[in-house]
Amino acid sequence: MLIEDKKRMAYTAVVTRVLEGDGRASRAERRAAFENAGLAEPLRTLIDKVAKQPTRVTNEDVAAVKASGESEDQIFELVICAAIGQASRQYETALEALAEAVTDKKRSEHASEDPQ
Amino acid sequence: MRLKILNSGYGFGTKVLFAFIHAVSRRPVPDAAKLVFYRPDFYGAPMKEFTHEAMRGPSAWSVGDRELMAAFVSKMNECEFCIGAHTATAARAYHDEAKVSAVLSDLETASIEEPLRATLRMLRKLTREHAVNADDMRAVLAAGVSCEQIEDALAVGFAFNTTDRLADAFGFFVPGPKAFEAGAKFLLRRGYR
């Protein structure tokens, strides 16, 4: 197996497990945390900070989500989904940019080999 | 840590293991380890597999280069725990502490190879702005970095853009330099699995 395929498979396994596997939070809620979209307060604030400004997360952010009825196990899962979601958008955007750059490069190499 | 389950929610076997680690290393189990031991089926086990592949699997980048990328991405995310852990690990892997601190304080003036510098620039933009474009990738390729090396660097980026977020969201305790030194030895001997 190609090295890069092994990495992609391990990556897909991480994402699939947290989104599709069993959990204490619903799949819909895990998906929303992953996408950082469609969540209600106070969860929205916590998840958005995990995605965009993780150093700004406070004890109060977590306490507010607990007070709203989420268990610690649900918060554990949703925070993980938020972190993986943001990192995964970065990763996939970058892989697409790389694919585009490599395709262009190959095209121009072919063009110079075959001037017609 | 901000969740009680990450301090004390472990089963008997894991508690015994933590006590053993504490006794042998004479240090408490680091929070990064506690995270991957909590309900490992959900996150710890698959993420350890990915991270080990990214950091220790076959690659044209050395282990030192990849640990430096981890430290550098963590620096961009201002994640104290991961900066400490991976600065120590990169310095130990390279046998060169000065090189690592030079890169972390100023990537543009640090005395490193151009392909590594171009790759770190791309990781910096990706981490700070959450996106890069084909021109950014062309610049890295033009510096002599292979497509596979870019993919390998992006895998390191994914691992640490995830881990840095979790370290800060869950509130990992940041230990002193001796603990990071001990952690670096462990990560170089055993990897992430």
Image (cartoon, coloured by chain):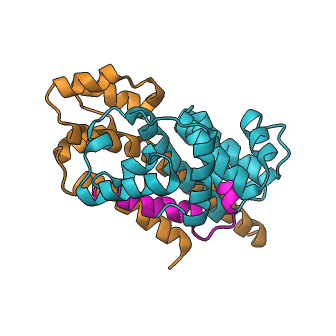
Kindly identify the residue that appears in the image at 66 percent across and 47 percent down.
Answer: B88
Q: Nearer the viewer, residue A59 or A61?
A: A59
Q: List x then y, in percent, for residue A104.
A: 65, 58
Q: Is B167 drawn above or below residue A39 in the view shown?
A: below
Magenta residue span: B41-66
Tell me where residue B167 sits by quadrant: top left
The reply to whether the magenta stretch includes residue B58 is yes
**Residue in the picture at 69% in, 67% down:** B60
Question: Which quarter of the figure has residue B87?
Answer: top right
Q: Is residue A15 visible?
A: yes
Q: Position of residue B63 (x, y in %)?
A: 66, 61
Residue A89 percent location from the top left of the image: 44, 45
* Residue B142 locus on image (x, y percent): 77, 54
Against B124, residue B43 (above or below) is: below
Q: Which residue is pictured at 52% across the width and 65% down the height?
A: B53
> Can you name the residue that lies furthest to the bottom here?
A1
Image check: A24 left or right of B57? left
Using the image as rendered, state which of residue A23 and residue B124 is in the foreground. Answer: A23
Q: Is residue B173 above or below residue B62?
A: above
For this rendering, which residue is in front, B169 or B116? B169
Where's the C terminus of chain A, which quadrant? bottom right
Residue B123 visible to the viewer: no
Q: Can you tell which quarter of the image residue A60 is in?
A: top left
Residue B137 counted in the magenta span: no
Q: Colour of chain A?
A: orange
Q: Which chain is cyan?
A: B
Magenta stretch, overall SS: helix
How many labels were placed on the picture? 0
